[in-house]
Amino acid sequence: MADHDLRHLPSPFLTLDIPDEAGTRRLANELAVVLRAGDTVCLSGDLGAGKSTFARALLRTFAGDPELEVPSPTFTLVQTYAFSRFDLSHFDLYRLEEPEELEELGLDDLLETGAALIEWPEKAQDLLPETALWIQITQRSEETGERIFSFHSDAPGWQGRVAQSFEIRAFLQKTDFRDAERRFLAGDASLRTFETVISGGRSAVLMRWPFHDDAVPQAVRAYMDKVHLARDCRSVVAIGTELRKRGFGAPEILASDLEKGLILATDLGSETIVRDGKPVPERYHAAIGVLAAMHGQTWPKTVLLDSGGSYEVPDYSTEALIAEASLFVEWYVPHVSGRALDEDARAGFEALWRQVLDAISGAQRGWVLRDFHSPNLLWQEGARGTDRIGLIDFQDTVFGPVAYDVASLTLDARTDMSEDLEMELLGAYVSARESQASNFDRAEFSKAYAVMAAQRISKILGIFVRLAKRDGKPAYLAHLPRLAGYLERVLDRPSVPDLKDWYARFLP
């Protein structure tokens, strides 16, 4: 189409001169990593401008397959690709006779769960989402493949997302991964996103974690502060570097820009300590060995950063532990009972937890990585000792009862842990600790373990219901029966009789 057909669009917020076809593929890569379900990207330009080249490169990035067959949907009008991240639908509207035909192609339905790339979008006139990103492509040289790309959108977010992607590329250009292919790896409930970057047969993991108070609701900020959740990537650098210095398997940091929230680290792979959804005992024993080795050391409250300054590891305070456990009352109890508890019951719950936590105040304290379970424990095939376990997702490390991490592992929220395996791992842990220190108090540890297990399970039950109901992630509800079984198992033990009585009264 000619430029005058874009008069209804806002002025471009970005215009790029791309010198060759390799640059076009690179640009498609930059956009692919920030694409989200629900997005519409309109590719506009004359015949031969490079719309299909760009769309094909973006689809191949999604697939992680540079040889993916991407036929033109000129005759079918739409081709949908099912990817693990989300579905991506490729439209070619050149043969669209009436704009209303777009409704028959089901664009609205496709956008509920996926994203759309649309060539010849002007054929649909005003039927496309107002939030679409329009990219005008103008070919300057057929011989070299030089093209001009103009980005148009006044929808909230697009300009920021595109800028973020280019900011990451600028960061990578200062590293050994300057020409890397980028692939979306993960995004969590916070502001963090992760990419795998690949260059010359090597791979690394890039994390982007800026913290902006205005991007986080006040209630969420208050909760983060209360339970001591980290706000920026300084915690990753501090905790990870200290772990590595002491011989534990945190990723090596290859480059960082703490002001922009960017960290490039070694890629520890994706194989965890479970196989086919089931725990692998050998790997869990290796993981419990890591905890025993960690708990045999004294860990600092203040960590000096190599770049200067320091990081303070927050205390896992009684208030924080109670606030987390209270998610059980706030979210899980109403979910299973159909009613919220009154203020007296809530106050009784908090008072009871304060009493129970006070009873284990003498338990060993140290670094608590906080999510020491299968998704964050990466199996390093061929390694030995503690090197067999790669550690990730430790940014929220606190200084508290070390039994918490033991319970995180032995009562893994993401896989079924039999009581036999739980007891086997606990026995291995206690044996290792007793061999390290003659004054290790088995009884004190057992009591702290029961309390921390009940606290963590209560918290996770609340979090999983919250993720399902508040955040629209119902898949987490599938884990509830497992966790409820763990809770029943723990409350049947003699260390927590008062907790057992309260839970028995207020749960169906």
Image (spheres, rainbow, N blue to C red):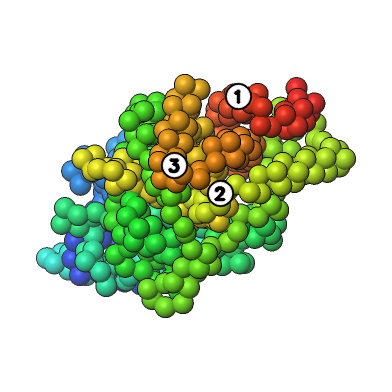
Using the numbered discs, state the Cα–Cα distance from disc 2 to disc 1 in whole angstroms. 23 Å
Q: Which mark is residue 329?
A: none
Three-letter code, disc 1: Arg
Q: Nearer the viewer, residue 375 or 109?
A: 375
At a point 41% along the width and 64% down the height, the residue shown is: 237
The residue beneath circle 1 is: 489
Q: CA distance from mark 3 to mark 1?
A: 24 Å
Assess disc 1: are there few (<14), some (14-19) or many (≥20) residues with their C-alpha within 10 Å of its C-alpha.
Answer: few
Q: Write the residue at 15% across / 57% down.
A: 200
When the figure is inspected, residue 105 is found, relative to residue 363, above or below; the finding is above
Numbered mark located on residue 364 in the image: 2
> Is residue 171 depicted above or below 266 in this figure?
below
Relative to 30, say whether 383 is above or below.
above
Q: Residue at x 76, y 43 (%)?
A: 355
For disc 3, the marked residue is 433
Can residue 199 be seen? yes
> With 59 as the anchor, is 487 left or right in this view?
right
Q: Secondary structure at mark 1?
A: helix
Please state which amino acid type lies under the numbered disc 2: Gln
Mark yes or no: residue 270 visible.
no
Residue 256: give x, y in percent of width and height: 36, 69
